Image: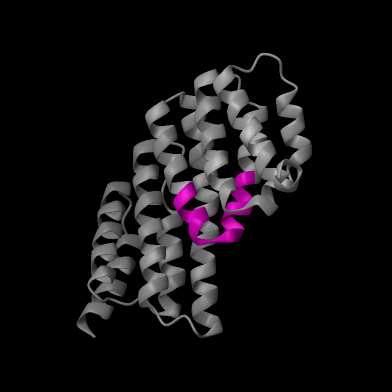
């Protein structure tokens, strides 16, 4: 009981803070408490979502990344440690996942605009982890990454984006098949380097497995 109430009290404390770094530290403590058997009740899931929404993604990529990373770990542990058999509990978890989907989409845009390869790799890693756990997230991010690739001209960024698409699509060939028109349009770009073209061809094979048997 002490662990559960402490977790919820910390979330409320963080919601009253104006400092992103304070809120981030609270998130990390909450993650540790959940790992130790703490519990977030469905009623408090909304408070946790409110805390996550308070991060200023556009002003600090590093804080935004840490927030998304910790949020992902909280979601995965919350799913494993909480009793989500009730509709209320499942809805609370779904709300957190939906928020993380949105936050990661914003973060992806920011790191691409900054042309920071390391931050892009880290962000794509979070996207892939979330997508492995939730098919709906995979569908959202596969579609988003195709749109992103169509608007990126930097060859190095494109290489990482298309490699991530390949990894995401291996377990979701039915999703990649829905993006075949966008994939064909990308392949028509004659300025693509060999690495990017290879990744796109791999996606094409994944989208049409029966044609290559």
Magenta range is 128-142
Outermost residue, top side? 191
Give the residue at x 38% y 43%.
Answer: 65
Task: Give the image location of residue 53, x and y in percent.
Answer: 46, 55
Q: Is 8 or 98 nearer to us in this picture?
A: 98
Numbered marks: total: 0
Any part of residue 60 in sight: no
Q: Residue at x 52, y 85 (%)?
A: 86
**x%, y% of residue 10?**
27, 68
Measured along the vertical axis of the image, is residue 132 above or below residue 88? above
> Viewed as shown, does residue 192 lie left or right of 131?
right
- In this view, the residue in front, 37 or 199, is 199
Against 41, is 141 above or below? above
Q: Nearer the viewer, residue 209 or 153?
A: 209
Q: Residue at x 20, y 82 (%)?
A: 2
Residue 12 appears left or right of 136: left
Q: Is residue 134 magenta?
A: yes
Whether residue 146 is in magenta: the answer is: no
């Amino acid at each position: 009981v002490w662990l559960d109430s402490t977790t919820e009290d910390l979330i409320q404390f963080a919601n009253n803070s104006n400092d992103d770094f304070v809120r981030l530290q609270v998130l990390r403590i909450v993650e540790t408490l959940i790992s130790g058997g703490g519990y977030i009740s469905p009623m408090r899931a909304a408070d946790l979502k409110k805390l996550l929404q308070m991060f200023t993604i556009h002003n600090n990529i590093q804080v935004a990344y840490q927030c998304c990373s910790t949020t992902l770990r909280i979601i995965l542990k919350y799913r494993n440690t909480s009793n989500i058999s009730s509709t209320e509990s499942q809805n609370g978890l779904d709300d957190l996942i939906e928020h993380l989907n949105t936050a990661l989409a914003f973060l992806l845009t920011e790191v691409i605009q900054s042309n920071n390869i390391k931050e892009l790799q880290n962000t794509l890693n979070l996207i892939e982890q979330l997508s492995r756990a939730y098919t709906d997230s995979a569908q959202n991010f596969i579609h988003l990454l195709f749109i992103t690739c169509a608007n990126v001209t930097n060859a190095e960024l494109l290489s990482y984006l298309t490699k991530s698409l390949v990894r995401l699509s291996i377990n979701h060939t039915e999703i990649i098949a829905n993006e075949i028109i966008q994939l064909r349009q990308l392949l028509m770009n004659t300025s693509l380097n060999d690495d990017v073209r290879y990744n796109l061809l791999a996606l094409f094979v994944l989208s049409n497995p029966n044609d290559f048997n």
